[in-house]
Image (cartoon, grey):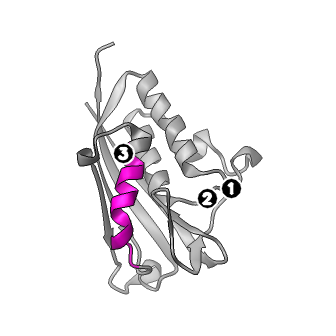
Amino acid sequence: MRIGIGYDVHRLVRGRPLVLGGVRIDSEWGLEGHSDADALLHAVGDALLGALALGDLGRHFPDSDPRYLGIDSRTLLERVMAMVQDQAYRLQNLDTVVIAQKPRLAPYIPEMRRNVAEVLDADLGSISVKAKTAEGLGALGRGEGIAVQAVCLIAQVSR
């Protein structure tokens, strides 16, 4: 068994769609980034890559590469999951925390969980997505960005 930890943060800007966990969220603010800036899926990808000791998303999908401009982060996570499967591992469970002062994310969490479970070919019961505020503290508390933490457990499977 292996454990991986992931983290991602993006600045909120006007005029971009807000996508988290593959769900488009109703908001006038979106996350700034080279891809669709889905911080939830980026943190999950980093956790999986970390569990395999393969670096981070930026190593595999650099923001300097025009192929990834505006790419759907589900595609990136599918590629990461292929790496997990190529090394004969399977996700056991995933726990994530989205830290966002705004907008309110609770109504979107069930769909986020379903999307993540689908991309990772995992049982819905093994996927946790939680949303917390920063209680008004710091840049996240002022609503300047959104951060996500993720931890996963993967286990080797018989070939």
| Gap in angstroms between the C-alphas marked 1 and 2 | 5 Å
Q: What residue type is disc 2 on? A: Asp
Per the image, the residue denoted by label 1 is 70
Residue 32 vs residue 21, the one in the foreground: 21
| Gap in angstroms between the C-alphas marked 1 and 3 | 22 Å
Q: Main secondary structure of the magenta part?
A: helix
Residue shown at the point (50%, 43%) measured from the top left = 77
Per the image, the residue denoted by label 2 is 36
Residue 119 at x, y percent in the picture:
44, 42
Residue shown at the point (23%, 47%) measured from the top left = 125
Q: Residue furthest top?
A: 159
Residues rendered magenta in the picture: 104-117
Residue 130 at x, y percent in the picture:
30, 64
Q: Is residue 97 visible?
A: no
Name the secondary structure under disc 3: helix
Dot 1 or dot 2, earlier in sequence: 2
Q: Is residue 84 visible?
A: yes
| Gap in angstroms between the C-alphas marked 3 and 2 | 19 Å
Name the secondary structure under disc 1: loop
Q: Is residue 136 left or right of residue 14?
A: left
Residue shown at the point (28%, 41%) measured from the top left = 123
Per the image, the residue denoted by label 3 is 117
Relative vertical location of residue 96 with respect to residue 27 in this rendering, above or below: above
Residue 41 at x, y percent in the picture:
47, 52
Q: Quadrant of residue 57?
A: top right
